[in-house]
Every structure is written in structure tokens, then in C-alpha cells.
Image: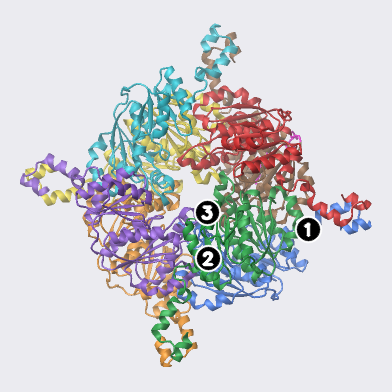
Chain colours: A green, B brown, C red, D yellow, E cyan, F purple, G orange, H blue
Amino acid sequence: MFESVRRGDVDVDAALERLAHLPFVDTPHARVDTHRALRQGLPEVVYGPGKTAEQIAEVVAAQRDADLDVLVTRVDPAAANAVLALRPDGEYEPQGRLLWFGRRDVPVAGKGTILVVSAGTSDAPVACEAAGVARRYGNAVEMLGDVGVAGIHRLLASSEQLRRARVLIVVAGMEGALPSVVGGMVDKPVIAVPTSVGYGASLGGVAALLGMLTSCASNVCVVNIDNGFGAAHVATLINRI
Amino acid sequence: MFESVRRGDVDVDAALERLAHLPFVDTPHARVDTHRALRQGLPEVVYGPGKTAEQIAEVVAAQRDADLDVLVTRVDPAAANAVLALRPDGEYEPQGRLLWFGRRDVPVAGKGTILVVSAGTSDAPVACEAAGVARRYGNAVEMLGDVGVAGIHRLLASSEQLRRARVLIVVAGMEGALPSVVGGMVDKPVIAVPTSVGYGASLGGVAALLGMLTSCASNVCVVNIDNGFGAAHVATLINRI
Amino acid sequence: MFESVRRGDVDVDAALERLAHLPFVDTPHARVDTHRALRQGLPEVVYGPGKTAEQIAEVVAAQRDADLDVLVTRVDPAAANAVLALRPDGEYEPQGRLLWFGRRDVPVAGKGTILVVSAGTSDAPVACEAAGVARRYGNAVEMLGDVGVAGIHRLLASSEQLRRARVLIVVAGMEGALPSVVGGMVDKPVIAVPTSVGYGASLGGVAALLGMLTSCASNVCVVNIDNGFGAAHVATLINRI
Amino acid sequence: MFESVRRGDVDVDAALERLAHLPFVDTPHARVDTHRALRQGLPEVVYGPGKTAEQIAEVVAAQRDADLDVLVTRVDPAAANAVLALRPDGEYEPQGRLLWFGRRDVPVAGKGTILVVSAGTSDAPVACEAAGVARRYGNAVEMLGDVGVAGIHRLLASSEQLRRARVLIVVAGMEGALPSVVGGMVDKPVIAVPTSVGYGASLGGVAALLGMLTSCASNVCVVNIDNGFGAAHVATLINRI
Amino acid sequence: MFESVRRGDVDVDAALERLAHLPFVDTPHARVDTHRALRQGLPEVVYGPGKTAEQIAEVVAAQRDADLDVLVTRVDPAAANAVLALRPDGEYEPQGRLLWFGRRDVPVAGKGTILVVSAGTSDAPVACEAAGVARRYGNAVEMLGDVGVAGIHRLLASSEQLRRARVLIVVAGMEGALPSVVGGMVDKPVIAVPTSVGYGASLGGVAALLGMLTSCASNVCVVNIDNGFGAAHVATLINRI
Amino acid sequence: MFESVRRGDVDVDAALERLAHLPFVDTPHARVDTHRALRQGLPEVVYGPGKTAEQIAEVVAAQRDADLDVLVTRVDPAAANAVLALRPDGEYEPQGRLLWFGRRDVPVAGKGTILVVSAGTSDAPVACEAAGVARRYGNAVEMLGDVGVAGIHRLLASSEQLRRARVLIVVAGMEGALPSVVGGMVDKPVIAVPTSVGYGASLGGVAALLGMLTSCASNVCVVNIDNGFGAAHVATLINRI
Amino acid sequence: MFESVRRGDVDVDAALERLAHLPFVDTPHARVDTHRALRQGLPEVVYGPGKTAEQIAEVVAAQRDADLDVLVTRVDPAAANAVLALRPDGEYEPQGRLLWFGRRDVPVAGKGTILVVSAGTSDAPVACEAAGVARRYGNAVEMLGDVGVAGIHRLLASSEQLRRARVLIVVAGMEGALPSVVGGMVDKPVIAVPTSVGYGASLGGVAALLGMLTSCASNVCVVNIDNGFGAAHVATLINRI
Amino acid sequence: MFESVRRGDVDVDAALERLAHLPFVDTPHARVDTHRALRQGLPEVVYGPGKTAEQIAEVVAAQRDADLDVLVTRVDPAAANAVLALRPDGEYEPQGRLLWFGRRDVPVAGKGTILVVSAGTSDAPVACEAAGVARRYGNAVEMLGDVGVAGIHRLLASSEQLRRARVLIVVAGMEGALPSVVGGMVDKPVIAVPTSVGYGASLGGVAALLGMLTSCASNVCVVNIDNGFGAAHVATLINRI
């Protein structure tokens, strides 16, 4: 742009105007996140809760018109049906509560495998969200479930699979101990996701969160409670490096 | 006593008077705990912090005069020296911060072995307090240290020792995950002791405490942060059943 | 297995394969907990909340096909009816919210009596869960209710019953003081269960939990808020020693 | 004053001026509390921590010059010596950490006895503060110590003394259960004082505080952690009614 | 009873049996609280939430059969209608959510007036619960509402009424500042009731609770959040002294 | 009034009576806030939640009869319809959940522009509440939305608009970082409003609240979570100075 | 700058370079805050804790060399002496713990008076910090101390002074109720500063902080605990508008 | 090993014995972490606090004898001097509080640059710990300090440097907003480190921690408060992929 100004192709006022609006001028009503996702070659992600089916359909339309893929997260079956009634071109994954509008097959851009490990059956929705997002973000994804630390043998039996992964997402509620054990078994980065599974002293996932933050395995980093999407985003970026 | 009243050996007023004072009439200045410990055939235990060397020596004297053993907990080396200067007949265990006045060898009254498992080297003081108290309470005690969950192989290598124990005390700070793993490996009661080891999100041991309370292993019960003494007491009672 | 390898009956690859899957090869969809329970000779326990009637019926079928007993916890009446519509061979205990599929009479394997003490009428569901689980786990169980510390005489009147028990489970909400008083009256291990009964400063059971953890009776250990099942599990293991 | 204005003895401006300064015009540098205490016929109370010996002596001088009694709270022995070096006319009670400047014998104005009950020896400083303040406030005071709930017999043996009291102050740390038990034994108001005695899950007295606030005895009300002075103040007012 | 034993009227076993059951033998299913209330000459109080209309009616029947009054607290209109359909002899006060079965006019046994002061209109239900309970407990009760500290003039205008009261109950949510101001205006005991009124940083009444506990007026004591009943109980006992 | 007394126009008793009731004598059932608002020349504001349509209509009627404007906050569409069915003279702004009864056009009394900046689309309701209240309070208001800190360019592009404002209200949930960034870009007071937007570690807005209180920009002050109304009130007072 | 580029005075690379460094190119080691302060015509403020005397002196030297004023906050007397030994040209205000290097008399730029109100004597350091900073920032400042809400008459007597102020800073610890009362008495913005004064349930100032955030006076906004400096900064900006 | 067994070189008992001890047989007194670090080709890291100079020197000797590098973290200058007096072959970095025993120049094994960004000067120790560890772990490291969000221009001026990095570690205390802003400017993984810098509502770093966990930038993951070492470990693993 400075070059254009110097050449006289663009005058100063116009340059200032463009400078102000550049990264978001074309889709004024969309979220800034879109642009960031775009720069990173990733589909747009919309957080579903608190939005009506109409609002979601509208955002999807804007993206699809621009030939962009859209992924809606945290969509329960009823909400999914409502959106699909408006836009039948979507694909719903009930386990991960994900609604996808876009290419049937996202080409794999990640260099290795992202392994999503989870502790108990109640952690499955968050694990499936992470896995589903990672797949739509162009990664090869494997899942390893039901390997809670109170039955350590099953986890150990999968140690080869753990070591093969390029990045690991470890999902656990209650005491949130699984990332520490997994972290000690691999020499790859482990992204820990606490879940709100539990009751009483689990304090809605805070116990698991604190446990993961104070993990004695130092290759563990943590995202927010139930944030399978965030874990998948970080894992994707690592997997693309 | 009712019998005595009926026989006329004791009149009603005296009976009421005795009823009121019975369990503590002889040592009016001592703690009720003494009496409870006595009833259970256990030595008296004195919590050291906040007491002067003189106060501790005085309590010890009262007990020793009655030919009872006394164990003082949470005594740092300086305090131990100060008490021992007043009463040289004590024995100090610096690792467990325990000061003992009594029989050299407490006869073993427990039926099996109490195994004290700990996660890291920083948890050793609490583990040693638990082990030291359990020994003075008349138990065969084994210790297994440095088996934190981030290096799970070492713990697994000791699975035979874990299974041999009649009761297990598991001590861990930071994320407090060790009791969950140990709990899954044995079919005995596990008494979990969170420690205040850690920083930041460990919140002075609260993270470990919450983790142990929400353990996915259901044979785990929990005592207060750093409470090695309490764990040893519960384990002793279980071991005597 | 090493022996088989040495004899040549099993080759190395097969050994590794079996080593990996051994403890859970036969029922691949079931929880690891099953195996642990099995090893301990206890029926499988399924945590009911968050599972559909179909999912529960499926787990039950798998267990019953293997001639194993199953206990489902935290089942409200509506959920119980839905499951029983699918599998009428169950038995529902509404007070303890327990659904049982298995032998009519579990043989008593515990060596003494487990006494379940509770403070107020609102604590009854948790006390009944603990008692029901303990019975299905093969224990002789007694209950003593409505003996909150604000009316201490009633508790004292039952002191003989307290002392007869081999293990005690003490259930209380609000200030959670009952385990301290009971702990001082017996020389047996006391497993304290805080309940979420209360409002305001009870903070959903946290007040009771903290009170029990800081009990001045040192023979008290604690499980999670409302965790009657966990208390029964620990008590069973103690009672079998 | 309105009368004076009407009579013309005082003009309007002067009335406004006096209205503004009336309750504190004579000792402009002193605390408002003084005046309140004065209105209630009670000696002035100064909170010691954070004040130098000089500052304390200065406040005392102002009060004594006006022939008023002063009580300084939370004074450790070193601080007491420093103040007494400046003003040797004081009387120090080390157990309650109270420093008194005033009449040797405060006439008893309370109608009955205030009984200060405490759980453990570590709670004694707060109990002594409450008792000392209550005495200086003109009450007959009795103390009953070392009656923690884990040794309930001793408390029961004193039930007559409990019932004789007109108001009860109950001091306890750790789980703070004593006020609930005492509350159930009497039909008088119980003022509960949580103490910061304890460690780990006692959270500096918060566990005891929450326990007292959620007491199942409904004749219990609560003051701040370690606030023996406040409890004595409330008890005094009740005892004077 | 000792006398009876001595005279031989009662043998030892029977004495022991009676000792065990005495304070609650006649109404085995009722709460211990009943007996306490009875001893204090107060009607029985039942906490309504979590009880069905049938359960409430049953408790009421047992009391009324023994010619005792019963007060049920925290009864919303729908629940009240359900109970009244079963027992039409009750009286419902919707503002205080109280359901009364008993004498139309409780004779006044309190010596002075209990004044219930409240801050905002949203605090009215708790204030009305306190006032309603206090009236049924036999007190003369006055109410002073809508005198929050942000409009201090109105409170000041009622200073005469404040000073006339024998005991004050002060109800406030949000910052809970009203008891401090009232406490400074009177020389009577102030029982502060924090309410759960507010949002965000009020943390369900915890902000008001902490504010009242740290009040700079030292004649203030505190009960649990929204506990109008407890405040009325304490106030009644003070008013009867 | 003193003058009247002096002249004899008003006798002393009447003066006392008037002194007591003066600021609120005319509308005895209304909130003290009304009077405060009146003194400041601002319309009355009623907090909607917890009030029935009838109660709201009644308050509105009282105000409108006195020819005063009324603004009801936190009114969801269903509640708004219910009130408007009773009083069709209102105006509903669904985005800010505001219901207005009064002049169509409030004259602008503020000296400059209040700019309401918000981070994400989910923060819009609180931002719209702030903007709507500020307009009804007689300010020129601008809004700048969707400028969360993770897309900093858009905020920078509006730096001119930021600098033009006389006062800024900055609304953000989740990590609540926006006020810090805006605060560093302007030399005007910034009123930060944390919102309850978020999940898990956002703890219902507490994360954003703490973040704003610890802002590294020292020209930031904070109001309660979701308190758009309070922010608008403070901003209005600043804008009128 | 765009103009310079267009004219060819500055080439594109240089423009980019300057664009990057412009706001801080001249004093590379200083804090960005400096520049912000500079833009607002305010002296630089350095937070003292954690800095050595040498580090403070160095920062001061850099500022004084550029002929700028510097204010160092939170400097205790010992630290002040250490700095003054290195740079005797400073002025120390012990009450507000402020160290000033600059003009003797800062010209008054604020349009009205900032009134700093504080509750108790222990709040004085924070009040003095606020007042001292406000003066150095060029404001006319008045102070009103010792007007805690438990002695409301004194505050009322100063209502004229309260109403005269253009902005009010209200400092209080413990229950933090003073800003609510003051807020109700004035129609100006009130900046509330919670202090860490108190013990037990004051939780290091959190009780006061929560109380101020939930104030029933809606013209109150809040800064961090003990943040007298921040309050003065906001007040200064308001006073300059 | 299975192969050896099959060949008969190793008998079954010996195989079991070796299986048990394999990963740690050679250095029985060292931490399991060592082995993990070894497997990952990283130097051993020892957490300094709570260890005496002698203990540290002993661990260092064991490692150096095995020709391994050792890094000791959180070593203040006094402790460093004490260790260096025992082992003068170490190198101390006071800013990062790191003590290094090993090769002068660690060969760079990371594929790109790790950029350590920090907000304020007080965050420097944690940033220097992260940078120092990352360098010793064989990474090219750059640092960018003093770019707090309240002066956003300086951060923007370094956007090129931000985008060049392969992994970013972002260190911030107080409101912890910097990772959100940086996360929005890059398409690489961001590891956020909250610091305990701040006072009052920063709650020892909890405010920053919560802020980072709820970041609106979804490429951010978090480690424990002040955990510069953990961030460097994760970043190293990412940089080696």
C-alpha cells in the first residue's frame, strides 16, 4: 500500500481509509475470527450456544456464498434439526455435537496423527468435539477412549499408539489425572482438556483443571474446561508446523 | 454403676458426680484425645506447632509419669533440640518430624503391612510422618517412594508390593493423581493424603485434595492436606480389625 | 505367559498382543472398572446419570449374559421405570435410587456389620445409597438415622450400636459435624460422607466437606460430596480384610 | 436543640453547626466507636495490631484524661511491654492478649452469667479474649475449655453449667462443630466464634465459619473468625437487656 | 430415674432402656428438633423444601394430634395449596412463605419488640419469613422496609423506632451494608441476615455474608444466607431472657 | 426549615416530623432510588427481574401520574409483552432488554459522546443495555462492537472514534482484556463492564471481573458483572460534569 | 507521515521503520506507560515494590534528564531513605508512601475538587496514596477521614463537603459499605477503593471488593484492592474533562 | 527381551525382574523424570526450592558423573553461591534464576525460533526462566519484553517478529491479556504463562490464569502460574516435531 501511495495510484486519504478497514472490509457483519481462520487456511468455526437456528443459518449462508466451509460447535440434536430444516446441506455429528457445512472430504494438511485420548465414557462428547474439529481442520485423527487411570493396564497396552502420535489431546474429568500419566509416556506435546464431568468436589471441572495445571509431567499444557475445540485448534497448528 | 447404685454402694449424688467426670477424672488438664487413644490402646499424640518446649515437656512428663508413651508431631529440628534439652529421654526422627517418648520397641499389633506410597521427594516429610506414626502405633510398615504418575513404569514394577499390603496410604502433592492409579491396582482400602507441595494453581494443596476426592477409583478415601498422622490413625484401626 | 513363550506354545508377537489386551479382551465395550470389580469379587456398578435407558439396558445385558450382577446408581424413579420397561428382571430401591440386576440374595462376605449413621431426614437418600450398595456388596448393614448433633442425646442412646459396628459410614450435610462426634465415640474407622443438603453458606456441600476434612477426630476419612457408593466400597474392603 | 432555637437561645447557623459536630465535637481525633461505646456505657476498645506503642499510649492518654476506661485488644507480650514502658498504669492479660487501663474492678452490670465454651487448647487465646472483654464490660463470666466434640462426654458432664448461663459464647476452630452441639443442649442464644486454628482444608478458619453458619442448631449466630471481642460485645448487650 | 432405680421401682435394664429412648420415645418418626423446640416452649418448625405435600401433612398430623403447633417454612404458593388441600386447617402467609397449623393467636411471651429492618423490596421475602416466625414464636414484631444504605435519610428518620426495639433483625442482600449502619445507631444486639438477592459479584449472597461478618459495628452477629427463620429463633431467645 | 421554626411558622414537633419524612413523603411506596434519581434529574430506573407484570405496571403508573419517566431494565420479550398488554404506552428495545415509559425524545444533557465498546457478539445485550440507558439519560451515544482483542486490527482502525469520546464504557466477557487495550489508547476514563459470557474457567464472569480489576491500564474502573445500567449511570454523571 | 512519503521526503522503508518505533523510539528502556502518561500531560508513575533503590534511581534519572516529573508509589520509609541517599532531590510523603522527584508545585489543572473519603484510621495509607497522587497530578484535593458507616452521624455532618466535590474517591476496608452510603448522598461519580484492612472473613480485602461491586448505589465504580493510585488516575481524568 | 527369553538367554524370573526395574535400574536414587528427559534427549532439570546446597550438589554430581547435563531452576543468588562454592563448574543466570552444569554450548536441535514475549518488567524473571530453559534445551530463542496490552503500539511494531516465530511463549501477570492479543496476530501455537505479579484481585496469579484459560484466541494453551520451565518444555517438543 505504501508503494501505491508513493506511485500516486492511491491518495493519502484513501490509503488511511483502506488501512482502517482492510482486514475486514469485505464481510462487515462477520466475526474477526473468520479472518484469522482464513489467514490460517482453516474453516470458520461458530460457537452454537445462544444463537437461534436462523442466526446460525445466516452465518452459514454468508460463508457458503463465499465458498468457505463452516463448522458449528456445541449443537445439540434439537438445534441441529432446526438448522438442517433451514439448510439441508449440512452434516451433523451427534457425538461431537458438530454441524458441518462444506466439502465432504477435507484434504489432510497435518503432517502426523493427532491422538485424542479420553478417560471415561462421560468424557466422550468433549473428546468427539476435539476429534471432529481436528478432522475438519485437515488432520489424521485417532481416538483412544475409556483408558482412565484407575485401570492403568489398558492405557499401557496402547503405549505404542500413544508414541506414534505427533500431538496428543487428553480429555478427562473428575480428578483429571490422565494427562500426567500420558505425558510421562510420550515425548510429544500433550494438550490437556478438563471436562465438567463429575459432581461435588469436582466443582464443575475445576478439580480436573487444577490437576492438569499442576501436572507433574512438564510436557502438558491446558485449555479451558470442556474446550475440545480449542485443543483441536492448538493441535492442528502444531501438526502443521 | 447402675448396679452399685441399686446395691446401695454408691448413692445417687455420687453416681451423678461420677457419671459426669468418669472418662477424664484422673488427668483433668490433659486432652480428651488422650482418653480416646487410651481406650484404643494407642500412645498419646500431641500436635507440636504452637506449643513451647516447656509446654511439650510438661505434657510428656504427665504421660510418662503414668507410664504412657507419647508421640509429638510436626516438630522441626530446632524445636526438637529444645525439648530434648529439657527431656533427654526422647527419640527424634527428623524426616517425619516426630519426637517419641516411650518404649524403644512397640510390639506389632496390626495384622498385616501398611504400605506408605509417595509421589515425589517433596512429599517425603508427610509420608515419613505417616510411616513413623504407624510404626509407633504398632504396625509393620513399608515405604515406596518416588513413584509419581508421570513415570508410571516404576509404580507398575512394584505392583506385587502394592498388592501384598493390607492397607495403603498414598501421599501426593501437585495434581494428586497417585491414589487413583494405586487404587485401580489393588483391592484394599487406600487412604489418600494430599500434600501442600506445589505452587500456583496447586493452591496450597487444594488441587491435590480435590483430585483425590473426585478420584475415579472408588476404593479411595481422603484425609486433610499434609495430615500424615490422621492417615496413619485410620490405617492402624483398619489394620487391627 | 512367559512360561508359554519359553515352551514355544505362544510366539513372541502373540505374547505381546495378548499382553496388550489381556485384562479386557473379552468384553471390549465394557468399562475397565468391571474388571477391577471382578477381581475383587464385587458386582459391577454403573453410574446412572447421563445414560439413556437403552444404554443402561445394554450394559446390563452384557453383564447378565456373562452371569454377572450389576448395580446401577443414582437412578430416579422415572429412569428406573424406563429401564425396567426394557428389562423387567431388575429390582428398584427408590430410597437409595438403586437398580439391581442379579441374585436375589447376595451372600454375606463381610466379617462384621457396617453401620450407616445419618444426621437428618434430608441425608437419607445418600445414606440409603451407601446402605444399599453395601448390602449388594455382601455386607450385614445396619442404619441409624436422624441423629444430628443438635440433639446429641439420641446419638448417645445408640452408643452401644455404634461400638458394635466393624466399620462406620457417617452421612451428614450442613455443617457436617456428625463424623467428629461419632469418631470420638468409637475406635473403628469412620468413613464420612458430606451431602449437598443445605443452602447459602453450605455451598452445595463444601461446608460439610471442609468440616469433615478438618475433623478433630483423627479416625475419620472422607469421600466426595453425596458419594454414598464410594463410602460403601471402602467400607466393604475394610470389612473383608 | 430545636427548643433552644425556638427560644432564640441558639441561632440557626449555630444550630446547624452544632448539629453537624455534636456527637464527636469534644475529641476530634478519636474514633467514632468511642462515642458509641460511651453511649452504651462501655469502655472504649482499641484494636491493637498495626499501631505503634506511641500511638496506643496516645489514645489511652486521651481516654484516661477524660476519666474513661480503655481496653486494647490483640496485644502480644512484646507490644504490651512497649506500651507499659510508656504508661505503667496498665494491666496486661497475656492469655487474652488484652491491655487494660482503667478501674481495677468493673461493677457487674450484666444480669446473668456469660459462659465461654471452647473446643481445644489452641482456641484458648480467642476464648480468653472473649472472656476478658466480657469481664471488663461488666459481666459475670465463666469458662469451660477443652470440650471438643470428639470427646462428647466431657461436654455432657457440664450440661448443668451450660444450662445455667444466660448467654453462651462458643469458640472452635477446625470443623467448628461445637456450637451445634451446645446449641442443641440449651435454650439460650449461642454466639459462635470460629477460630483460625487448623491447617490445610481449614482454610484459615473458613471451614469452621461455614460450619457454624450452616449449623443445624437454629439458636446459633456467628461473628468473624477469631473475633472474640465482637462475641463479647454482642453477649454483653444481650446480658444487659 | 436414679431415684426410681434406688427405690427398686425400675430395674437396671429398664433404666438403661429408658435412658436410651427418653427424649424421643413418644414420637419415633419425628425430628429431634421437635423435642428441643418443645423444651423451649416453641412450636415445631418444619423446613419445607424437598418434602412432598403428603410428607408435610403427615408431620403436621402427628404434631396436631399431640396438640402442638407447627410452622412450615419456605413453602411456595403451589406447595401451600397442595398441603392445604390435604389439611384445610392451615393458614398461609404468602409473603413469608409460611404455613401455620395451630392456635389463631399465639400469646406474646417476648418482653419487648423485635424490629425487622430490610434494605430493598427484593429482601422482603426473607424479612417476612423472619417477622412471621417471630410472631408465631410469641413476639411483638415491627417491620421497617426499603431503608437501604444508598438512601440513608429514610433510615435516619426512623432512628427512634430503631432505638425502641429490644432486638433487631437486619436483612440485606447485595453489599449487605445495612447491619453496619443500624448497628452503629443502636445499643442492642443486631442479628444480620444476608440474602441471596443480587447478581454477578454478589455470588449468591456470599458478598453480603462476608460484608456482615466483617462489619465495623461490633454489636452485629450473623446467620446463614436467607435464614430468616434462624434469625427469628435467636431473636426470640434474646427477647425472652 | 430552621428559619420556619425560628419565625414560629412551624412548631418543633412538626419540624421533627417533617425532618423525618421529607425526602420521601410524597410517594411513600416508591424506592428511595427514585428520589435520588429525581435529585439528579434522571428518570427512575426499575430492575425488572423478580417482579410481575402487574407490579411493574403499578410502579410505572405511579411515576407517569407524577409525569416522570420510567425505564425498566432486564425485561425479556415475554415479560415486555405482558407489561405492554397492561400499559400499551411503553416502548421496548429488545436488544438492551429495556422498557421505556416517557418522553419520545430525551433532550441531550451530556456534554460529549459516550462510546460503548464491546468485544464479542455475545456481549451485545449488556452493551445495548448500557447504550440504551445512557441515551434515555440524555447522552449522545455511539457503539463500537465486535472488536475483541484477538483481532486487534479492527479496534486500531477505530482509534479515532475511541479518542473522540468523552467517556468510554467497555464491555467484555471471557478474559475481559478489552478495557486494558482501550484504556491504553485513550486519555479518558474507561468504565469496564465484565459480562457473564463464557464457560468453564470464566466462572460466570468472575474471570473477566478479576482481569478488569487488575488491568495494567490505570484509567480503568469497574462495575459489577453484566451491570450495563450501572456503567451508564456513572458515565452519565461524568459526562454531565 | 503519509504526506512525507507522498512528497518523497521519506522513503517507504524508512516510513515503515518509523511507524514501528514512533511512540517509544526515544527512550527505549522505559515503560510504555511513560508515553501514555506523557500524552495525557501527567508525570510518570513507577510502582516501587520489587525494585531496588538503584533501579528506582536509574528510572528517576532517565526521567529527570528529560525534564519530566516522576512519582514512585508504595515506598516504605526504609526504601525511601535508600533511594534518597542516591538522589537527594526527592520529596517523601510517608503517609501515602510516595516519593516525588519533580516540580515543587504542580499547577492545578483539574476543574474542581477531588474529595478522598475514608472509613477508618487503618485505611489512611491508601487514602493518602490516592490524595497524594491526585495532588501531584494537578488537582485540588480534600480529605475526609474516620467516617465509617457504624457512626453515620459524622458522615452526615459533612454532607455539604461531599456535595461540593466534583469527583469522590471513597476508601474502605472490612465490609466496604462506605461508598454505598456516600454514593446515595451525592450526584457525582464515586470511585470506590477497597482496602486489605481486616482479618478472617475480610479475605484480604475481597469482602470489601465484593461489597463495592454489588453496591446498591449505582453511581459507584471500583478499582483493585488498595489501588489508591488507580483511583486517583481515574479521578484526575474525570476532573479534567 | 521376549526374544532373549525365547532363545533361553534369559530365564523367566530374570526377565520379570528386569521388566520391573528396567527404566531406572542404573541410577536408583534419581528421579524418574531423569529417564524421561533422557529418552527425549534433554538435560535433566531439578526444581531448586526446598533443597539444600548439598542436596543439589549431590544430584548434580550423579548426573555429571554419567556425563549428563543438569539444569537447576528457581535458584536465588544466595542459593546459587552456596551451590557454586561446592561445585564451581556451574554457570548461573541470575535473571532466569537458573544454574547450569554441562556443555558450554548446547547444539540447536529445534527447527525454528521460540519467541518469549512478556508484558511488564515484573514478568521478566519468568520470561527469563522460559528463555533460559529453552536455550539449554537446544533452541534458538528470541525475547520481546515490555509489550503489555495497555501500550498496544509497541506490540504491533513487532508483528513481523511475532510472525517469524515457530512457537510463542507469552508471559503476563495482572489481567493476563497479552496471550489473547498475540494469539490473534499469529497462526502458530501460543503457550501462555500466567505470573503471580500483581496484588489484590490478582489473587496470586489466579486472575491471569483464568484470563488465559478463557482467552478469545483459540490458539492459546496454558501452563501453571510462574511455570516458565513447563512452557519451555512444551515449546521445545513442538519445535522439534
- In the rendered image, the quadrant that contains the N terminus of chain G is bottom left
Residue B33, given in percent of the width and then of the height, sits at 59, 33
| Residue holding disc 3 | A79
Give the structural element (helix, strand or loop) at label 1: helix
Is most of the magenta stretch helix, strand or loop? loop
Query: Which residue is at a point 25% across and 45% down the rendered structure image?
Result: F30
Asked whether the beta carbons under mark 3 and mark 2 sit within 8 Å of each other, the answer is no
Q: Quadrant of residue H235?
A: bottom right
**Where residue H24 is drawn, which disc sits there?**
1
**Where residue H217 is drawn, which disc sits there?**
2
User: Does the magenta segment cover residue B100?
Assistant: yes
Vertically, is C207 above or below C121? below
Chain letter for the residue marked with disc 1 in the picture = H
| Residue A234 vs residue D40, the one in the foreground | A234
Residue G148, given in percent of the width and then of the height, sits at 31, 49
Disc 3 residue type (three-letter): Ala
Query: Which residue is at a point 74% across and 28% down the rendered structure image?
Result: C107
Q: Which residues are magenta?
A: B97-111
Disc 1 residue type (three-letter): Phe
Residues at discs 3 and 2 both on one chain: no
From where the camera sits, is residue H122 visible? no
Asked whether the beta carbons under mark 1 and mark 2 sit within 8 Å of each other, the answer is no
Mark 3 crowdedness (10 Å alpha carbons): few <14, some 14-19, many ≥20: some
Disc 2 residue type (three-letter): Ala
Residue C237, given in percent of the width and then of the height, sits at 71, 36
Vertically, is D105 above or below A28? above
Residues at discs 1 and 3 both on one chain: no
* Label 3 to label 2: alpha-carbon separation: 26 Å
| Residue A123 vs residue B127, the one in the foreground | A123
